[in-house]
Image: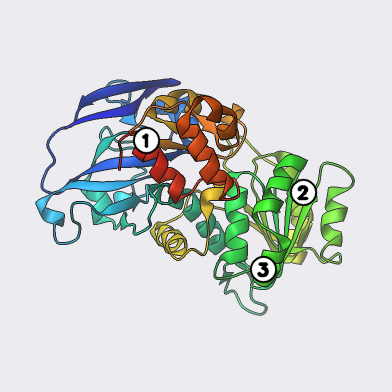
Amino acid sequence: MKTTAVRLYGKEDLRLETFELPAIKEDEILARIVSDSICMSSFKAAEQGAAHKRVPDNVAENPIIIGHEFCGELVEVGAKWQDQFKVGDKFAIQPAINYKGSLAAPGYSYCHIGGDATYVIIPQEVMATGNLLPYAGDAFFYGSVAEPMSCIVGAFHANYHTTNGSYQHRMGIVEGGKMAILAGVGPMGLGAIDYAIHGPRRPGLLVVTDIDDARLARAQKLYTVEDAAAHGVKLVFLNTGSGDAVENLRALTDGTGYDDVFCMAPVKPVVEQGDQILGRDGCLNFFAGPIDPKFSAMFNFYNVHYGSTHIVGTSGGNTDDMKESLKLMEQGKINPAAMITHVGGIDAVIPTTLNLPKIPGGKKLIYTGINMELTAIADFRAKAADSELFAKLADITEAHNGLWCAEAEKALLAHFGQN
């Protein structure tokens, strides 16, 4: 079986290549990848090459397939797994498989599996650890964004609070409490807003900040104050680019501060702002992973001692988080399509990955079986005059509040003879 894939050979050395996959073993599964969303973690792996913790030292001789937010269907199932999986099943994968304590993960560490490929071989450790996850949704792209959504689910579960008079921690955000999502209208911030409003445990007050009016306006259009109120959440959007941001944020809590604060950007002033708005027993979640291994920020340890403030950080979700995100999507309770702002084919992977921090917008969604330049959903209409495909995609997405959707995916794949 031939596959076409984007492989990493070293620092900023990505190559789109077609090569032969070996026949699968009895404990492996052959799969077709349909969609993959590109993550900043792939940019970091491409920037660091073998210096990345998950990338093998010998990557120059044994290149790995990048991409870890993928969804597809099973093509051939090895004998060992035929009682659990069948050909044609849709699937998603939790890449942080943690097999025997190893950091090895699809999209970072393997020669024959990664999201930016047409066909892959799923190794036995993925199934052995329960990380090959059935997916019953009607669009493949939801399976791709299940992984980033699981990171959000995991972060909400990782927050904790103390219990007066004991040393037992209460895990999770404070239900009915006060929450702030700082720098919160990027792709992951939008997912966090969605989960905070529509997830199983919700704050009473949710304040979302940014310094870009256009990004805030888009978030307000996607997540309305009225819908949040219908789910028991008072939603406030705040531009912190002017005035005293800390004073303005604390004023929204009558000066008491926030129970849960999520920092969605690895920026020193944002982290310090998060510390300064914590209330008693407040938990600051440093969500966004920095590239600089020496990244640091000031933290008020007087409040740590006397106000029980604390900090937590998460890097990805676990398998249960992934299952929860898939279930919520299948039930229609959350819609991570809001994360996606660009769509392209496998030929767009290399320039998109290497330039990801410079490309505005949210998630970049790749369909690996097609060739198409990366295109912003907002630009579909501008291309419609010269393209029947983009005219159709513009009509569909405009009818869905400017969002990518199952109908758009079906139209795109049908145009290229995919299914």
- Determine which of the numbered discs, if any, sits on residue 415 in the image: 1
Among numbered discs 2 and 1, the one appearing first in the sequence: 2
How far separated are the C-alphas under marks 2 and 1?
48 Å
Residue appearing at x 54%, y 55% in the figure: 152
Quadrant in which residue 171 is drawn? bottom right
Element assignment for label 3: loop
Measuring from the top left, give residue 112's x and y in whole percent: 25, 35
Q: Amino acid at mark 3?
A: Pro
- Viewer-side residue, 234 vs 389: 389
Classify mark 2: residues with Cα within 10 Å, few (<14), some (14-19) or many (20+).
some
Among numbered discs 1 and 3, the one appearing first in the sequence: 3
- Write down the residue under mark 3: 203
49 is higher (above) or lower (below) than 86: above
Q: Amino acid at mark 1?
A: His
- Determine which of the numbered discs, if any, sits on residue 85 in the image: none
- Viewer-side residue, 66 vs 59: 66
